[in-house]
Image (tube, rainbow, N blue to C red):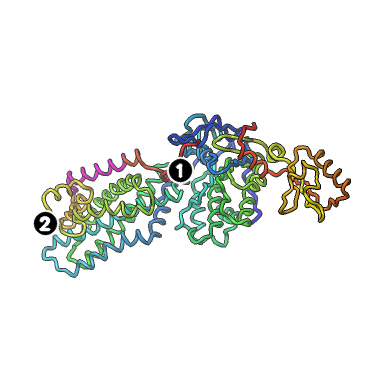
Amino acid sequence: MSELTVTDQTVPREAAPPLRGTGQLLAAQVRYQMLLLVRNPRGMMLSLVFPVLLLVLSSVRRHPDPRLEDALVAGLAAFGVIATAYISHAIGLVTSRQDGVLRRWRATPLPTWCFFAGRIAATALLALASVAIAVAAGAGLYHVHLTGAAALSLLVIFALGALAWAALGTAVTALVPTAQSAGPVLMLTYLPVILFSGGLGSVSAEPGWLATLARYLPAQPVISSATAALNHAGPGLTLISGHNLAVLAAWAAAGVLASLLFFRWDPARPRHAPRR
Amino acid sequence: MIAIEVEHLVKRFGAFAAVEDVSFDVPAGQVAAVLGPNGAGKTTTIEVLEGFLAPSTGAVRVLGADPRQGGRAGRARKARTGLVLQTTSLDMQLTVAEAVSLYAGLFPRPMAPAELIEMIDLAGDAGTRIGALSGGQRRRVDLGLGIIGRPEVLFLDEPTTGLDPEARRELWAVIQSLVAAGTTVLLTTHYIEEAQRLADRVIVLAEGRVVADAAPDQLRARGGTPVIRYRLPPGVSAGDLPADLARRVDPQRRELSLPSADLTADLEALVAWARRSRADLTGLEVSPPSLEDAYLSLTSESPCLN
């Protein structure tokens, strides 16, 4: 090891320079979190490759109604968004917690909100990239016609969906003890919701009660809004219905509140026996 | 100036008291080592000082403030402290250079990333992902991230556990250069040699309490005694020695090993016997008390010596 010395440390401590600006810190966090996400092969497979693969496999079957094709593309785009914002995001947090990385961040001058904002912004950006890829694949494989207005509507819908699911993913880490158990716990909550909400194809034959339940879960509002945006042929934006917006906002608020109350920076401590 | 203050710290987890009543101060610029067996309360104490745990009762202050203080003042204090956790805490997907630059960007007056990477001897691996480094190299990255902000106070929780002797010495060299520049260091360790090499002062914990707090030399003198060793020459048996000495002979090794509270008297007795018996004293050794002996004696008895 080199014999370097830290001579600059003798600078007078009284004249402490100001802390770094939060804009600069946030930009660095987004870049850092993006690097972690794109260097995670399992997450990239789930977010970017699976939706396209499922679209390719589904294209073997002919869909008589173009609106069903719009629904399929919207559903699989939502599948990728939610996989990124919920599963990859939450597994990443649990792994960082288990590895002591969260603890290290907590001890730095980085504001807590900046850490989460950076992480969620990077997650949302990757989620939107997965939408772009899925919709492009849909346009190539199906009769999906994407107008500029529809693209903008999709951007808003999926960004809102990603934020709501990222809030839920943050909250659910409190229930996941280890990185090894994160996959099963998250998949058990994710797959039924995405399946009954039409993320993997039409749900027209669902019983009424299940369809009603799905309308109040956080996947169906994203899928139905995105389907409406793709169906919409006019020049204007497709507005998200009040119901869908309210459901997403409620789930996002619940996720944020639960995160504030229950989020853990450290792994669970082992139990100790009382000292003699 | 006092950099670290601990006043009657108690930390309980349910019915378990990890720390029962610990008090000490560390003046600025001092290196204090906290020694103790597993479960003594070392890591809990340092975690309270790092702000990760709240005391059950008692108080701690780092650079004059509560380490759990939030807001802008809390951020400013965090910018003046560094830490190395007990286990490696790194993002394996980042390269060494990316991690160092990222953390440098958090502090108001960081070391230059290239300078730090050189200092931790990883210039040749700056572009390597941390996940591909050896355990010793990762530990050096850990230390690098702990000191990138030029901390005034540095917490090191068993920084060299699991490292080979060479890697340990390399890490010591980095820590010593920080100490030379005036950084206050509180380290926990299992290694007596590490405490002896780095620390101005040793605080020994046992069962959640301070059982000794002194400079290494004082502690050695206080808790340990010199040892007289003498291998019996051929033709001499333990029974030939005076009874007090004979009891301390290991019959297998044919060696006298006598911890001596009164060195002069014990040597006089041995020399007098040798003169009478015309025994050869070649190989007679007197070993000074070791810090390890003192530590073992303290942690096995754990009476308060302060």
Name the amino acid, label 1. Answer: Arg
- Residue under label 1: A106
- Residue A258 appears in the rendering: yes
Question: What residue do we see at 52% from left, 30% from top?
Answer: B59
Q: How many marks?
A: 2
What quarter of the picture does the C terminus of chain B occupy? top right
Q: Earlier in the sequence, mark 2 or mark 1?
A: 1
Helix, strand or loop for disc 2: loop
Whether residue A75 sits left or right of residue B220 in the image: it is left
Which region of the structure is painted magenta?
A239-257
Task: Give x and y (percent) for residue B169.
Answer: 64, 53
Local crowd size for mark 2, using a 10 Å CA cut-off: few (<14), some (14–19), many (≥20): few
Which numbered tag is attached to residue A205?
2
User: Which residue is rendered at x = 63% and y = 50% of the image?
Assistant: B172
Front position in the image: A204 or A59: A204
Most foreground residue, A270 or B127? A270
Q: Is residue A58 above or below residue B165?
A: below
Where residue A88 appears, x then y in whole percent? Answer: 34, 54
| Residue A241 in magenta stretch | yes
Quarter of the picture holding the N terminus of chain B:
top right
- Whether residues under marks 2 and 1 lie with C-beta atoms below 8 angstroms apart, the answer is no
Q: Residue B223: percent from the left, percent from the top?
A: 68, 38
What whole-number distance in Å separates the C-alpha atoms at marks 2 and 1? 49 Å
In the rendered view, tell whether residue A231 sits above or below residue A274.
Answer: below
The chain under label 2 reads A
Please, which residue is most extreme toward the bottom here? A60
Say what secondary structure mark 1 lies in: helix
